[in-house]
Every structure is written in structure tokens, then in C-alpha cells.
Amino acid sequence: MTSFPISISRHELALVSITMVWGATFLIVQWAMQHSGALFFVGVRFLIAGAMAALVFRKAMRGLTWREVKAGTAIGTALFLGYALQSHGLKTITSSQSAFITALYVPMVPLLQWLVLRRRPSLMSWIGIGLAFVGLALLAGPDAGHLTLSAGEVVTLVGALAIAAEIIMIGGFASGVDSRRVTAVQLLAGGTMSLAAMPLVGEAVPAFHWVWFSCAVGLGLASALIQLTMNWAQKVVPPTRATLIYAGEPVWGGIFGRIAGDRLPPLALLGGALIVAAVIVSEWRPRAGMWARLRGKAK
């Protein structure tokens, strides 16, 4: 009898672990939103994460350049928009819904590159975009064949678009900057912008509560740890393999939401599954030989 052992490296296990942490953050943010406004919470969370990153990378921070400040500020703007909108959406939608909708940033990346940078998406990206759209329609709850999104789902979807823009900017600024310094700057910039935006939308500083405080500190430390782990693990784990692992984020979000009492209807669960499939398909790049073999079998 032939055995097929499963091999997973410690670097991949580390990425699986942070994906589980990511999945849990949706539920934690939802708890915090019961006692704090979205902008205040995101601001405190990212300032803590940025301070931690600056502390860990304190030697590298001495070489900070003006280009890295500009890059970090630009990326931090998208980071602020993405997470502030996601946190605001969690006031009215479940953590499971938020996790699946946020995962749409993966198929959004090639579509945004096409619209802004004129880089045409690959066939697999188009398939992923199609699966994502159908999944979103089912997750939102189709009404007589129409896509009906609540206000919370809409702002979460816009937040996912901001995260997609963040990823594109990270790739655009990758050459010529130090990732450690840019990470610290983007977190500090995003946190500062979030707090600065509070008066513009009329959000007040919440009364002190141990729930929002502990959630902000915990997620701030987690954000710094996640970034450090990604930087370490992805020196060894190929990007495609890493993306497949990250596709588990909404699944873990759904699991933690289920434990907390979320009860998505069957069609919504199917929509979530299609979104996860869209994430995987969007990043799958079949070898040229595979297409040739498939065409040969078709004949």
C-alpha cells in the first residue's frame, strides 16, 4: 500500500498560525465596536503596532529616507481606509460576513491593476473575479435575482478595495525601500490619520472600557507580530503557496464567528465557499504544459 505523507515546513506552519489569528480578529473587532468608534479603535490599534515595529526595527529606523516616508504614508492611507471601513461595517454585520467580504481584495487586485495600470488580468484572474461576484451575491442574500447589499456590507466591500490598493502600492514601492522601515511608517501613518479623521465625521473619544482597550492592545501587538512572521516566512515560502495558506483567513473567520453564535444561511455559506475558491483560483498559475495536456485530452 502506497502512502502519501503530508509535509509542511515550520515556515508554512507559522503562516497557518497567523492566518488563524487573522480569522479571529474579525470577532475581536466586533466586540470592540460595541464600546468604541471605528476611527478611534483603528487609530489606537495601529499606533501601538507602529510603535512596536519601530521598537523592534529601531536600528534599521536610523536609515529612514524621505522616499520611505512617502511610500509608508501612501500605503498607510490605504491601510487606514481599509481597516476603518471594515471596523465600521462590523457594527452592523457579522464577523463571518466581514471575513468573507474582506477576502475579496485578492480577486480585486488584478481588476484594479487592469483599470488603473492597464495590466490585463490573466484567464484565472477573470475566473476568480466571476466566482467572487457570484459568491458575494449569495453571501449578501439575493432578492429576486438582484444583488442587495446592506450599508455594513457596502462599506466593508469598499474597505476590501482599499486593501487591494494597499497591496498594489506595496508592490509598486518595493524596490528601493527597506520593508522594515516602511512597515513602521505605514502603521504609524495609518493610526495618525484615523485619529485625525475623528473630528471630520463627528466621532468622539469613547469612555474608557477594558474591552476596547484590551482589544486595541492585543490587535496592535498581533499586527506587529503578523508582519514580522510574514517577512520571515515568505523568504522561504513561495508567494503562490503563501496565498493558498492566506485563503484560509475567511474560513477561520467563519469558524470563530460560528463559535460566537453566527448562523449564516446555506446560500450564504455557499457564497463564502465561492469567495474562498475565488481567492485560490485568482492566484493559481497553471504551467503551460498543463494547458497543452488538457487541450490534447479534449481532442
Image (spheres, helix red, strand yellow):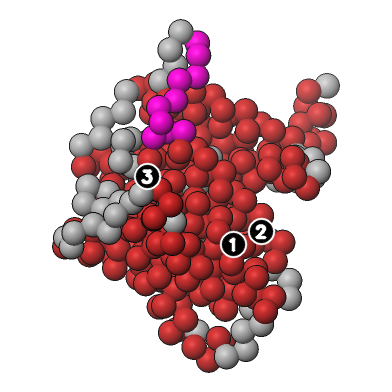
Q: Does the segment drawn in magenta span residue 92?
A: no
- Left or right: 110 with respect to 137? right
Magenta region, main secondary structure? loop
Residue found 62% across the figure and 62% down from its top:
74
Packing grade of label 3 (10 A; few <14, some 14-19, many >=20) is many
Residue 139 coordinates in the image, percent (x, y): 42, 27
Hey, what amino acid is under mark 3?
A: His
- The residue tagged 3 is 88
For the C terminus, the quadrant is top right
- The residue tagged 1 is 75
Packing grade of label 2 (10 A; few <14, some 14-19, many >=20) is some
Labelled pair 2, 1 in contact (Cβ < 8 Å): yes
Residue 252 coordinates in the image, percent (x, y): 36, 47
Hey, what amino acid is under mark 1?
A: Ile
Q: Does the segment drawn in magenta span residue 150?
A: yes
Query: Which of 259/292 is in front?
Result: 259
Residue found 69% across the figure and 33% down from its top:
126
Residue 165 — which label? none
- The residue tagged 2 is 169
Mark yes or no: residue 211 visible: yes
Which span of residues is magenta-colored?
Answer: 145-154
Q: Quadrant of residue 141?
A: top left
